[in-house]
Amino acid sequence: MEIQAAISKIDRYSSTEQGNKVEIIERPNGGISIVMGEGKLAGSRSQDVTMKAVHAVLNMIAEGVQDGASSRMVLRRIHDEHQQNADVKISVISCDLLSKTIVITKNNPTPVLTYFEGESRFLPLGGSDPYDPVVFQFDLGIGRTYVLVSEGVENAGAFSNDKINLRTALASIYEDHNDEPSVQDVADYLLKQAIGHDNGRPRDDMTVVVLKVSTATVKDIRREYVYFPIKKEID
């Protein structure tokens, strides 16, 4: 058995500051966690408050604190520090080998999708309290794909009355491939579809996170691949 994960993201068109942050970490008792955050401070996008929240959650998970407790403590700490001026959305997806479950933690209603046995679905997840995230656990079944998206992906095309249908888009990538697509294929495809619905100019930061538990392809070898474009030339 192996964990496969991929992340694809793009900044809002003509933006110089990222509002989204996503990071991945190995869990201390086995497995991985991916934390995605979107933050605003005093109504404006804030890279600083987003990074602070995401890194704090990651650090607590690395110390063995459960996902829900980590997110809850960090969100309340940011609330106390910034009062009513900070708005941070946190989504965490973990493959926890200790409990043998997929754990999803959210304080926001942005949808989570899954694909399994030829069907794409929205998971019935809540999470609308900004300071009290909800936690869901699912059995660690091989072959099920989970997808987290940011608000920018969820709302792609809404301004032009051509809003993306995420379930249809997720099903399409599988229908269009003779072989089963990789998690990176899925993440790239969904991001490309969202960008297209915004006419090539994303109105908000867009992030797609894909996680899947699969049968092992290579024994004992761990791989990570990062492609990070740099907008400005470095002297």
Image (spheres, helix red, strand yellow):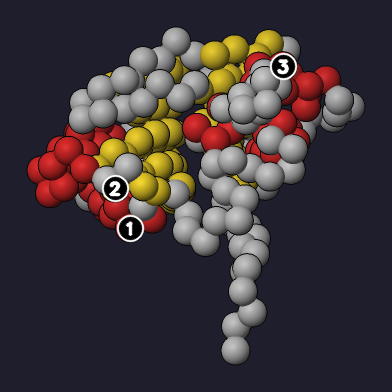
Residue 189 seen in the current view: no
Asked if the residue under mark 1 is in contact with the one under mark 2, i.e. CB atoms within 8 Å, the reply is yes
Q: Position of residue 124 (x, y in %)?
A: 44, 10
What is the three-letter code of the residue carrying label 1? Asp
The front one of 158 and 169 is 158
Helix, strand or loop at label 2? It is strand
Location of mark 1 (residue): 48
Q: Position of residue 86 (x, y in %)?
A: 24, 43
N-term-proximal mark, 2 vs 1 = 2
Residue at the far right: name it: 178
The front one of 43 and 68 is 43
Q: Which quadrant would the N terminus be assigned to in this image?
A: top right
**Label 2 vs label 1: CA separation?**
9 Å
The front one of 150 and 28 is 150
Q: Image point 65% across, 60% down: which residue?
A: 227
| Placement of 68 over or under 167, stated as above or below | below
Q: Nearer the viewer, mark 2 or mark 1?
A: 2
Location of mark 3 (residue): 168
| Placement of 17 over or under 169, stated as above or below | below
Helix, strand or loop at label 1? It is helix
Q: Quadrant of residue 142?
A: top right
Residue 198 seen in the current view: yes
Q: Quadrant of residue 101?
A: top left
What is the three-letter code of the residue carrying label 2? Leu
N-term-proximal mark, 1 vs 3 = 1
**Label 1 vs label 3: CA separation?**
35 Å
**Label 3 vs label 2: CA separation?**
34 Å
Q: Image point 40% across, 21% down: which residue?
A: 109
Q: Residues within 10 Å of mark 2 (few under 14, many from 20)?
A: some
N-term-proximal mark, 3 vs 2 = 2
